[in-house]
Image (cartoon, grey):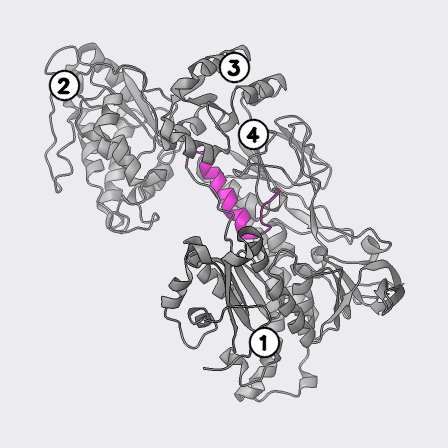
């Protein structure tokens, strides 16, 4: 490799313009990396001088074209996970001393500004240290100044073609003036895919080991090939014992990372473990000496440290699993994603994408929209539209069902294509642990495929729960079945007080069906009960009947067919005025069970890796999505105990987890998550309910600002829903009225809530809402004019116009 090639490379690096944008996607380094990966295979053999020159030609061509201006380097966010502050720390005089370099700000500044740091090499190596670029597939050998003669480390600088940025760049011509060390440098450089060799002044080794900050310690630990240990100086003896334990177990390759004491809180936060030292095996935090002994004595370590077929196996092809699989693959891992849907008792199954796409959020929202359009048709006459008589305007369930299923089918196909594009191996088989690191996947034909991996992610979601009564599984449907019923559901009973039950009841009523809701006690347990009761009143006002009871048995009177729902008789008990109960019954065409959902994990073989589950079958894990009892098993989404059962939560958690396991300090914030219940009048909320706020902070410390309001679009058609629109802010008095909870019942509440959700993430106070100027006329502007404080015994609020 010629000196001219080096010079061209250094000039190229320094020509990358500074960023004027804050969008990470407008990052020249990211764009260059993708282009280089496209031009050169990741697994290409060692590059010779000729091939290296071709690579530089490609880089120069990319830099010289229009993309150089369109994608300037992003110094704000940093490339590949490095922030500007981290880059500055790496290029500081202190860091250079730790590398054995003179206190000059030279080539490291340019290199570290676009390359990530790999911890797979130790700084204690005198001759070289390799930096691995996971995006560009490049290895940059940075050689220390360890010259044998004075003056050989002379700072020979390149000419400055562009605004002073090259003034700190070293010439590569000095590398052949270094005798044996120079030859060694040249050898290492030619063995690397891309190399930069530079000289520096001779320095003496610093006494003791350098201490590391949290972010760099975690990066090195998560990316260690076999094992790593983060420890404080006071943990030296325990570190030696742990090293001995691992050596006896056959783990001889371990990176030792001495961290600053000030780094402990952040390391504890992002690992979910307390205290030091913390051992990592293949990037997964295990814990201290006792945790390591537990893994060794349990016989899991020997298999764990072996080489496996995959870096990660994801079990579950729902929203969270797909997001995690694609993110992991984009970060360089070899990933397999397993997904298999066991049919419901009624025989319903679906494609790749999980509950949300197939039998949850997507079809629910589309059918909710169908019902809203029915109301809008009625409103249209008041707004001047001439329509056929109401008797001639009918809803066709079969057309709706077919169009919804066609859309879902397109999404299923899109997910399969996305996995293929990300090089994720999609396996349509039911995965079960048959070893501590082995999964056996059985497809619909009974064929078994065995796969092994270093780590596993469970993202299997939940399935509907059935009541233990005669006829429930034989004759009733759940949300797994409703959206693909080939026939009109007819008169429907929705059993349960969950949001699924209320949402389905709402859109079925909006389509013109006779709907009843059978509930045992309160609606929407866990949500704000003031709002829940208002939803009950609005739905009852809309003609939905509420029955305070539970079914005791279901009998079939007329079997269902592909064209007809059939007839069912539901038995239940009603309380009489004297307090006694009397059994009664009613006929329905369809009975929808929506009493909750359970994890289906009992048959996954989780006893083999030793994964603990709660009574509902959910994975018991840390705040970091890691299993408490098996450090290489993680879980995201509904199957993780204590996790909000929301699709966006699973998606965010899956992506964030993968980035953290590659060394980025990132956690999913499970607090103040905005959500919406798509009842006829939508309910949007974020943060604490009024009841939860009082339970946590006390009644005297909670102030509720509230009011009713009248949406303008409801005035002309005189919609009944206008009497039920309501909003409130739950605030903490002792914290300057910081907003604890945001709640609104109105049309399009989901859109309103998503926008205001950021305010709660930023700890907004009531005065922030007061000083915000509203958009008129909108329902959202009512949050900017709230003055009424909720008090016991207040009269019913009355809505007024502008």
Between residue 586 and residue 314, name the one nearer to us.
586
Name the residue carrying label 3: 246
Task: State the residue at coordinates (59%, 60%).
Answer: 528
State which region is magenta: 641-664
* 427 and 131: which is toward the camera: 131
Closer to the N terminus: mark 2 or mark 3?
2
Q: Which image quadrant is residue 231 in?
A: top left
- Callout count: 4
Answer with mark 2 or mark 1, whichever residue precedes in sequence.
2
- Tell me the SS state at disc 2: loop
Q: Which residue is mark 1?
A: 795
506 above or below 658?
Answer: below
Q: Is residue 646 magenta?
A: yes
- Residue 606: image location, x then y, percent: 67, 32
Instruction: Tell me whether the residue at label 3 lies in contact with that at label 1, contact meaning CB atoms closer than 8 angstroms.
Output: no
Residue lying farthest front? Answer: 700
Instruction: Work out whether mark 3 precedes mark 4 in sequence or the reverse, and give the earlier one.
Output: 3
Q: CA distance from mark 2 to mark 1?
A: 85 Å
> Magenta-highlighted stretch: main secondary structure?
helix
Q: Nearer the viewer, residue 410 or 246?
A: 246
Secondary structure beneath dot 3 equals helix
Q: Residues within 10 Å of mark 1 (few under 14, many from 20)?
A: few
Q: Position of residue 705 (x, y in %)?
A: 49, 67
**On the image, numbered disc 2 is attached to which residue?**
153
Q: Which residue is mark 4?
A: 632
Quote the CA–CA distance across marks 2 and 4: 47 Å
Q: Which residue appears at 42% of the width and 62% of the height?
A: 766
Q: Tell me how far mark 3 sits from mark 4, CA to CA.
A: 17 Å
**Above or below — where is 393 with respect to 450?**
below
């Amino acid at each position: 490799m010629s000196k001219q090639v080096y010079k061209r490379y250094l000039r190229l690096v320094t020509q990358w313009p500074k960023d004027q944008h804050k969008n990470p996607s407008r990052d020249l380094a990211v764009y260059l990396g993708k282009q280089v990966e496209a031009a050169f295979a990741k697994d290409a053999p060692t590059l010779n001088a000729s091939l290296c020159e071709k690579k530089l030609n490609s880089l120069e061509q990319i830099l010289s074209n229009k993309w150089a201006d369109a994608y300037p380097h992003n110094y704000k966010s940093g490339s590949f996970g490095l922030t500007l502050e981290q880059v500055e720390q790496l290029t500081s005089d202190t860091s250079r001393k730790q590398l054995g370099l003179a206190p000059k700000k030279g080539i490291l500044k340019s290199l570290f500004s676009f390359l990530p740091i790999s911890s797979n090499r130790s700084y204690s190596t005198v001759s070289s240290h390799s930096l691995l670029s996971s995006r560009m597939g490049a290895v940059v050998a940075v050689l220390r100044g360890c010259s044998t003669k004075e003056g050989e480390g002379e700072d020979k600088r390149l000419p400055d073609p562009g605004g002073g940025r090259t003034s700190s760049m070293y010439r590569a011509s000095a590398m052949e003036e270094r005798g044996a060390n120079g030859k060694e440098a040249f050898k290492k450089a030619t063995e690397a895919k891309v190399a930069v060799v530079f000289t520096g002044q001779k320095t003496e080794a610093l006494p003791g080991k350098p201490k590391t900050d949290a972010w760099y310690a975690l990066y090195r630990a998560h990316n260690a090939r076999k094992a790593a240990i983060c420890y404080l100086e006071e943990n030296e003896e325990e570190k030696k014992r742990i090293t001995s334990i691992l050596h006896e177990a056959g783990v001889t390759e371990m990176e030792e990372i001495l961290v600053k004491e000030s780094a402990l809180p952040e390391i504890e936060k992002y690992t979910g473990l307390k205290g030091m030292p913390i051992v990592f095996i293949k990037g997964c935090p295990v814990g201290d000496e006792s945790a390591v002994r537990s893994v060794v004595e349990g016989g899991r370590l020997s298999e764990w440290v072996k080489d496996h077929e995959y870096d990660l196996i994801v079990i579950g092809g729902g929203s969270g699993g797909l997001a995690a699989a694609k993110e992991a693959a984009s970060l360089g891992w070899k990933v397999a994603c397993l997904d298999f849907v066991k049919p419901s008792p009624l025989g319903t199954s679906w494609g790749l994408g999980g509950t949300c796409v197939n039998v949850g959020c997507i079809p629910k929202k589309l059918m909710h929209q169908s019902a809203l359009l029915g109301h809008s048709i009625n409103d249209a006459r008041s707004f001047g539209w001439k329509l056929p008589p109401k008797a001639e305007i009918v809803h066709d369930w079969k057309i709706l069902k077919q169009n919804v299923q066609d859309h879902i089918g397109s999404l299923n196909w899109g997910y399969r294509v996305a996995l293929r594009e990300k090089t994720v191996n999609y396996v349509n088989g039911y995965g079960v642990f048959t070893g501590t690191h082995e999964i056996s996947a059985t497809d619909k034909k009974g064929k078994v495929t065995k796969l092994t991996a270093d780590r596993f992610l469970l993202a299997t979601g939940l399935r509907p729960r059935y009541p233990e009564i005669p006829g429930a599984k034989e004759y009733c449907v759940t949300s797994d079945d409703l959206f693909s019923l080939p026939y009109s559901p007819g008169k429907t009973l929705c059993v349960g007080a969950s949001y699924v039950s209320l949402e389905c009841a709402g859109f079925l009523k909006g389509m013109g069906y006779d709907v009843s809701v059978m509930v045992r006690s309160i609606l929407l347990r866990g949500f704000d009960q003031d709002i829940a009761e208002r939803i009950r009143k609005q739905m009852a006002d809309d003609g939905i009947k509420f029955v305070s009871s539970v079914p005791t048995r279901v009998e079939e009177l007329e079997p269902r067919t592909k064209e007809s729902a059939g007839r069912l008789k539901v038995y239940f008990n009603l309380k009489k005025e004297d307090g006694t109960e009397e059994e009664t019954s009613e006929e329905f065409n369809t009975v929808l069970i929506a009493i909750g959902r359970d994890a289906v994990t009992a048959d996954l073989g989780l006893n083999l890796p030793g994964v603990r589950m709660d009574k509902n079958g959910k994975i018991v894990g840390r705040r970091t999505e890691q299993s408490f009892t098996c450090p290489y098993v993680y879980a995201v989404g509904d199957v993780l105990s204590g996790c909000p059962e929301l699709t966006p939560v699973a998606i965010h958690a899956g992506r964030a987890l993968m980035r953290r396991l590659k060394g980025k300090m990132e956690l999913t914030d499970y607090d103040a998550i905005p959500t919406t219940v798509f009842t006829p009048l939508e309910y949007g909320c974020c943060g604490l309910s009024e009841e939860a706020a009082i339970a946590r902070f006390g009644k005297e410390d909670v102030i509720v600002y509230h009011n009713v309001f009248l949406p303008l679009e409801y005035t002309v058609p005189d919609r009944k829903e206008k009497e039920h629109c309501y909003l409130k802010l739950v605030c903490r008095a002792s914290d300057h009225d910081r907003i604890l909870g945001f709640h609104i019942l109105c049309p399009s509440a989901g859109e309103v809530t998503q926008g205001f959700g950021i305010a709660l993430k930023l700890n907004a106070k009531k005065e922030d809402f007061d000083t915000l100027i509203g958009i008129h006329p909108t329902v959202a502007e009512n949050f900017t004019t709230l003055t009424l404080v909720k008090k016991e015994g207040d009269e019913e609020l009355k809505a007024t116009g502008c």
